[in-house]
Image (tube, rainbow, N blue to C red):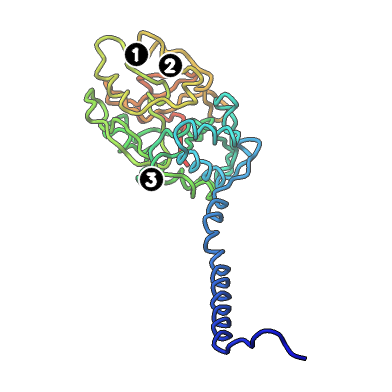
Amino acid sequence: MCRTGRRPHKGLLIVIVVALVLLAGSVALRVTMVPACSSSSASDAATTVEQRASLNDYSWDELSRLSSMIAAADGDDGALQVERDYNLVDSSGHLTGATKDFTLSDGTAVSVQIAGFRHDTRSDGSGMAGITFIFTDCIASRPMCTRADNAGGWRSSAMRAYLNSGMLEELPSDLREEIAAVDKRTNNVGETDDVSLVSTTSDKLWLFSFVEVTGDVDSWWETGRQPYADVLDAEGTQYQLFSEAGVACSSGNAESAMGYGVLVKSFDGQACWWWERSADDDDSSRFNGINGEGEPNVHGDDADDATGVVPGFCL
């Protein structure tokens, strides 16, 4: 039997074999590169947080990742979408009052709630902290300073040293590892009406300033005390928790402030005064605070009085 067609040339067979080898190598190369190309998906998965019903259901690691997502969101609208998606606010964007419960190293049961979002600046220069928390009640009763003297303000106070060392160590390790140091603006001089003396500290645990609780001080301060109002106003801005609750001082002066339920705190079952980090600007012996009826008080307590401690912190 005769075969039709020509016998392939040997040189042509070699070319075909080489081409097939090169093609196989190319396919193999593509296959081995797939895992490297998929690394971005793994990174995305690492930031994914499972949606939970309430604040108390999240771990501190999950809340820290949510805080990073809120901080990195495209503007306040983008942040609000994250907050809604993960049930940190209600459908209208308001805080729900939900708490997260945990236990200090000495066995004390405590809880915190969200004070605001994208409010504080991280001290490491990486931008905003996504979530700020406040304790729902006093976690201790301590003096602000060792004597009745506000010289050096918050920066030099015994309270600041205690919160950022001893108190910090009492927190659960999984929370402590996630807390971010943030910049806090405060009159760190004491008795002064010079707004240029307001300066910045970096803190992991801190007390709220007068203006962070009440909002704009200038609108209610009595005539003749404007320089003191300017000092207090330079210590930050009001948190969402307090603005939504309508906290403000009534017209006239600080002594006629109204009480607010959100500001009523207790210690050992008793309603009590609690400290703010703002020094009394015209009395060298005192720091500002909130009284047991939830009234912001610009004259507060003597610095060496044992008064309630309600810290804040950021993730």
Q: Nearer the viewer, mark 2 or mark 3?
A: 3
Task: Kindly identify the amino acid type of the residue bearing the numbered disc 2.
Answer: Ala
Task: Kindly identify the amino acid type of the residue bearing the numbered disc 3.
Answer: Ser
- Residue 185's x, y, as percent? 32, 33
Marking on residue 257: none
Q: Mark 3 sits on what residue?
A: 126
Q: Mark 2 sits on what residue?
A: 248
Q: Quadrant of residue 166?
A: top left
Q: Nearer the viewer, residue 29 or 223?
A: 29
Q: Secondary structure at mark 3?
A: loop
Q: Is residue 118 above or below residue 4?
A: above
CA distance separating discs 2 and 1: 10 Å
Contact (CB < 8 A) between labels 2 and 1?
A: yes
Q: Residue at x 23, y 31 (%)?
A: 197
CA distance separating discs 2 and 3: 32 Å
- Furthest residue to the right? 1
- Residue 96's x, y, as percent? 58, 27
Q: Residue at x 41, y 39 (%)?
A: 128
Q: Mark 1 sits on what residue?
A: 219
On screen, residue 256 versus residue 294, left or right, reads: left
Task: Kindly identify the amino acid type of the residue bearing the numbered disc 1.
Answer: Ser
Q: Nearer the viewer, residue 300 or 21?
A: 21
Q: Is residue 4 above or below residue 105?
A: below
Marked residue nearer the N-terminal end (2 or 1): 1
